[in-house]
Amino acid sequence: MLQNTNIEIINQLIDLLNDIDSVVYSDSLRPLHYSTVGQHVRHIVEFYQCLLKSRTDGLVNYDARERNIHIEIDKNFTIELLEDIKKQLYDSKTDYPLSLKTQFGADEAVSILSSFYRELTYLIEHTIHHLAIIKIGLNEMYPEIKIPQNFGVAHSTIRFRVNANG
């Protein structure tokens, strides 16, 4: 079930947030062009919020996220949001059609047919991608923080590594 996979990945993120202090959460990380863990986490949270909002109107528009600075600077507030997202995902038992609205550059906005499950699939990869970026920044700036080996690693890569190593 796609919801369970998303919840597992969110749990990895919550575990990391519980393991780092607030200074690390909001520190500008040089290897990430001075972005913060909090900025990447906000980006993840708001993509989930956009998708979950689509349950009411059948439209998802990741470009129209709130960009709530509070998520970037308050990890405890953010953990609460992530827990709420997990609950909403758990309660979302069925797929449904939706329209994905997006715009690139100065081009006119387009709407693309999609579905809740399709977007959940996208958010798995999107979230893992940002976890990998967070891992790079923390490993470079805070090597004393122990991050699990498979944090920020795609499921297909984990399967490949297991199969390659017998």
Image (cartoon, rainbow, N blue to C red):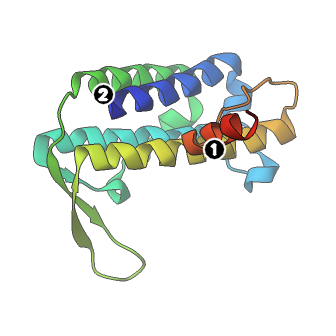
Tell me the quarter of the picture where residue 137 sits.
top right
The numbered disc on residue 89 is: 2
Label 2, label 1: how far apart the Cα atoms are: 25 Å
Which residue is painted at 58% across and 33% down in the image?
73
**Looking at the image, residue 105 lies above or below residue 19:** below
At which x and y percent is residue 76? 53, 19
Q: Is residue 43 visible?
A: no
Relative depth, front residue between 144 and 4: 4
Q: Residue furthest front?
A: 166
Question: Where is residue 41 drawn, in percent x and y?
Answer: 55, 38
**Looking at the image, residue 35 lies above or below residue 45:** below
Could you tell me which secondary element the residue under label 2 belongs to? helix
Q: Position of residue 95 (x, y in %)?
A: 18, 40
- Direction from residue 94 to residue 12 in the image, left or right: right
Whether residue 15 is situated above or below residue 126 in the rendered picture: above
Q: In the figure, is residue 48 to the left or right of 98?
A: right
Residue type beneath disc 1: Thr
Q: Position of residue 40 (x, y in %)?
A: 58, 44
Q: Is the C terminus in the top left, top right, bottom left or bottom right quadrant? A: top right
Res. 146 image quadrant: top right
Q: Nearer the viewer, mark 2 or mark 1?
A: 1
- Which of the 4 image quadrants contains residue 109? bottom left
- Decide if residue 19 is on the left or right side of residue 145: left
Q: Dot 1: what SS?
A: helix
**Residue in front for this viewpoint, 88 or 149:** 149
Amino acid type, residue under disc 2 in the picture: Leu
Compare residues 165 and 16 and report the one nearer the observer.
Answer: 165
Residue lying furthest bottom: 107
The residue singled out by tag 1 in the image is 157
In the rendered image, the quadrant that contains the N terminus is: top left
